[in-house]
Image (cartoon, grey):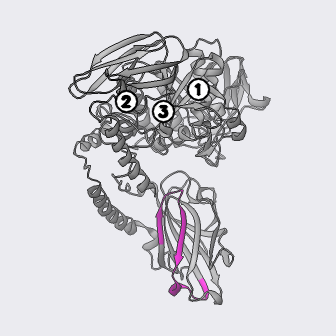
Amino acid sequence: MKNKHILLISILTQILILRSFSVAGQITLPAMFTDNMVLQQQSEAPIWGKAPANKPVTLSTSWDNKSYTVLADVQGKWKINVSTPVAGGPYSITISNGKKKETVQLENVLIGEVWICSGQSNMEMQVHGIGSVYNYEQEVAAANYPNIRFLSVEHNRSSVPLDDVVVLERGWRVCSPATVANFSAVAYFFGRDIYENQQVPIGLINISYGGTVAEAWTSKESLLTMPDFADEVKALDHFITNEAEQKRIYAEQLIAWNKNIISMDAGFSGQTAWNDSSLDDTQWLNISAPGVVEKNPGMEDFDGLFWVRKEIEIPQSWAGKSLALHLSNIDDIDITYFNGVEVGNTSGWNVEREYTIPAGLVKAGKAVIAVRIMDTGGDGGFGGHSEMYLGLSPKDKIALKGIWKGQKSLPIRNIPPLPRNMSTEANIPTFLFNAMLHPFIPYSLRGALWYQGESNDWRAYQYRELFPLMINDWRKQWNTNFPFYFVQLANYKQRQESPTESDWAELREAQARALHLENTGMAVTIDIGDAADIHPRNKQDVGKRLALIARANIYGENIGYSGPVYDTYKIEGNKIRIRFKHTEGGLKAKDNEMLSGFAIAGVNRKFYWAEAEIEGDEIIISSPDVDFPVAVRYAWADNPLCNLYNGIGLPASPFRTDDWAGVTFNNH
């Protein structure tokens, strides 16, 4: 269904683009220019569209009763920069080609602050819809802010830059209890905080796409300058646009890939295949289902190919009858067997697995369900969105919840990359920039918000270059050094008992390094994540922390906006002294507990949990296990136990003093 949905969106996109820039004799506007829109205050705000070729277009603005006239070019394209006043409204804009019947009137237009809000699923997560925030009922009921406006862009992808987008709800929407639920929660809470403190209209443009990588949001011109992507981007010059041919190529590649994986799969390399009902799996690991497989002893942090098996007893009354097998959802790809015979396969972490066991396979007595699971990253296993059972009917069934047997087969690092279906894949360099961002250039903005990184976590070192490249790319496209504020990854996944390496810690470090770019800011969320959910529900504090950065650095409020940030370190005998910036109100441990989250290492590079003592704007780190320390790390884990704050209640950003190569160092 997902692939069909994307195909339909692509077709509708092209139809709407043709429709918006089409009929000779008419004024047409791209989809972002509608009633209720917001234009950036005190700017030369571009408005553009199409009209009859070489004919005059006149635009009038009600806030100053000023008119502008330009000639459409030979292709009918025109653009007018309108001078906007200080924040206010509502106003109207009239666009005409001299014929009354073909005049376009935009009503209820506000002048205020416009922000593009982009990234992957944590930016896309809605107040109530695709996920729900804490207290969403109260948040929805209280969302009576007519001077906050939303524009949401539909998912799309393209190998070439597009001129228009498909927008949801037919354009800009006025914030109200009836409209807020479907909008980006992070964007809304950011905009609400800015509005309540600045009392200016706020325009929020949501351009996000769950599960996507940063290179997909970056232009061809910029990616060509980065060696890791240059060859792949050059190859897109020969991209096959014929969808049927794309699907044919993908099918051939997938067959070849599957054959290769089967040859590598331990489940098929022994004397008895792991799908065979006669296999002795008593020495396998115990796996709780439903649940995240990485939470089971022996499977910690495992991504890749693994098998799970469940032995059941088929009653005599079921023999010779077809059965329904319900396995809930499986993360990410499964092939399911009943007594050694394949009965179904599905791809997609959020897709319910419902397979039919043919009557000819059903015999009384022992039976084995074996599931071969490919976990491509993050959580893996049975999701538990619905009941797991085998039976004749929902009433006559055997529950499958409980302990299964499991065994690792092939770690993700040893698995060749899965072929990409180029007719549906969003994570192709430039594709989201082309389809979803490019059409907005040069819409006048105050700045950009960004919440992404989870999909680039295994290439965190590469993100050190890619992320600043993308920021500079966007600024170059708009020809302005607008503010760019982003969210550092929250705490997530199983907590480790000892200091360890972490791809998420390395991604957070890569994000923090982007602060070397001017006019950037980072909201730290290391304390408001969820170990079991990559989409934490506390989006209120995320939006608030982003808003603090803007309020302090753009809107001139005299407030603190950052938690403690590592500045310098000094080795003093068997201790290391760490100095911090942004210590407003002093350094503190949350709830006055002992400081936690610090680790210290000597020349052998082995880290031990450390004792930490606050002295003014500094912290003294030591451990009886390290006589001569050379490095300190703080909150260096996927889901660290850490509690350093400043006096205004903002958490310290994770950091390390060393530069030793990490687990993602050579990943490209």
Check the image and report above or below for 565 versus 376.
above
Label 3 is placed on what type of residue? Ala
Q: Nearer the viewer, mark 3 or mark 2?
A: 2
Q: Secondary structure at mark 3?
A: helix
Label 1 is placed on what type of residue? Ile
Query: Considering only order in the chain, which callout, 1 or 2, is on the residue closer to the N terminus?
Result: 2
User: What's the magenta region?
Assistant: 344-366
Q: CA distance from mark 2 to mark 1?
A: 22 Å
Query: Considering only order in the chain, which callout, 2 or 3, is on the residue closer to the N terminus?
Result: 2
Q: Which residue is mark 1?
A: 148
Residue lying farthest right?
Answer: 592
Q: Which residue is mark 2?
A: 29
Q: Secondary structure at mark 1?
A: strand
Q: Residue at x 26, y 33 (%)?
A: 24
Q: Nearer the viewer, mark 2 or mark 1?
A: 2
Name the residue nearer the viewer: 501 or 429. 429
Classify residue 270 as left or right of residue 524: left
Classify residue 544 as left or right of residue 432: right
Q: Is-magenta flag for residue 586?
A: no
Q: Residue 169: give x, y in percent of width and height.
A: 51, 39
Using the rendered view, name the quadrant where residue 125 is placed.
top right
Q: Residues within 10 Å of mark 2 (few under 14, many from 20)?
A: some
* Residue 99 visible (yes or no): yes
Label 2 is placed on what type of residue? Leu
Residue lying farthest front?
Answer: 100
Q: Is-magenta flag for residue 354?
A: yes
Name the residue nearer the viewer: 101 or 294. 101
Using the rendered view, name the quadrant where residue 644 is placed.
top right
Name the residue nearer the viewer: 636 or 11. 11
Q: Residue 473: give x, y in percent of width and height.
A: 37, 27
Q: Which residue is mark 3?
A: 510
Q: Nearer the viewer, mark 1 or mark 3?
A: 1
